Image (cartoon, rainbow, N blue to C red):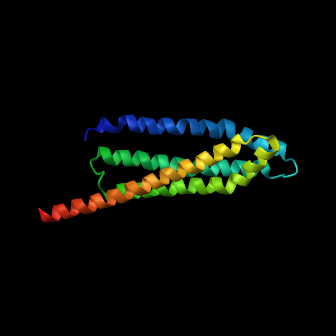
Amino acid sequence: MKRGSTLFLKIAVIFIGMPVLALCIFLVPKIADFGAELYPEIASMKYLVSIDLYATAIPFYFALYQAFKLLSYIDKNIAFSELSVRALKKIKLCAIAISIMYVVGMPLFYLIAERDDAPGIILIGMVIIFASMVIAVFAAVLQRLLKEAINIKSENDLTV
């Protein structure tokens, strides 16, 4: 396969990571400060919110890296390999981890939304949870299909 065939997708993966990086740099500290202002009696609120949001960025970027590797495997004509199956498995696990971290952090966002009277915060958190679960299910389906395709390919190679 031509090397440039996945160039657009690789650029898209890079551009997906840029807004999240900007959010981590500029918006997360403001959200943490806002949470600390709403609950001055909870001294660690700022740190809890920051840890939860920054912790979810780690599996997000790891999943983007795995997607980039998967596109590289496609460029090298080794898309139907165990390497691709492992990359999809890691993407699935990262999506599950993001969902779990947001579920764990949801009480913090509930407290902020309750005090500020902004139910949209909870809705945004739920959208992130469900979007991550959809990505996990999609990656699991692709992983299984790829395993079956590899098995069929190996059987055909042995037959010929």
In the displayed structure, does residue 100 sit left or right of residue 139?
right
- Number of numbered discs on residues: 0
- Considering only vertical position in the picture, is 46 above or below 18? below
Image x and y of residue 45, in percent? 79, 50
Picture quarter with the N terminus: top left
Residue closest to the far right: 41
Q: Nearer the viewer, residue 33 or 129?
A: 129
Name the quadrant containing residue 33. top right
Q: Residue at x 67, y 57 (%)?
A: 104
Q: Nearer the viewer, residue 16 or 96?
A: 96
Name the quadrant containing residue 83. bottom left
In the displayed structure, does residue 122 sit left or right of residue 72?
right
Q: Residue at x 63, y 38 (%)?
A: 23
Image x and y of residue 39, in percent? 84, 47
Q: Residue at x 37, y 45 (%)?
A: 71
Image x and y of residue 10, in percent? 41, 38
In the displayed structure, does residue 139 sit left or right of residue 148?
right
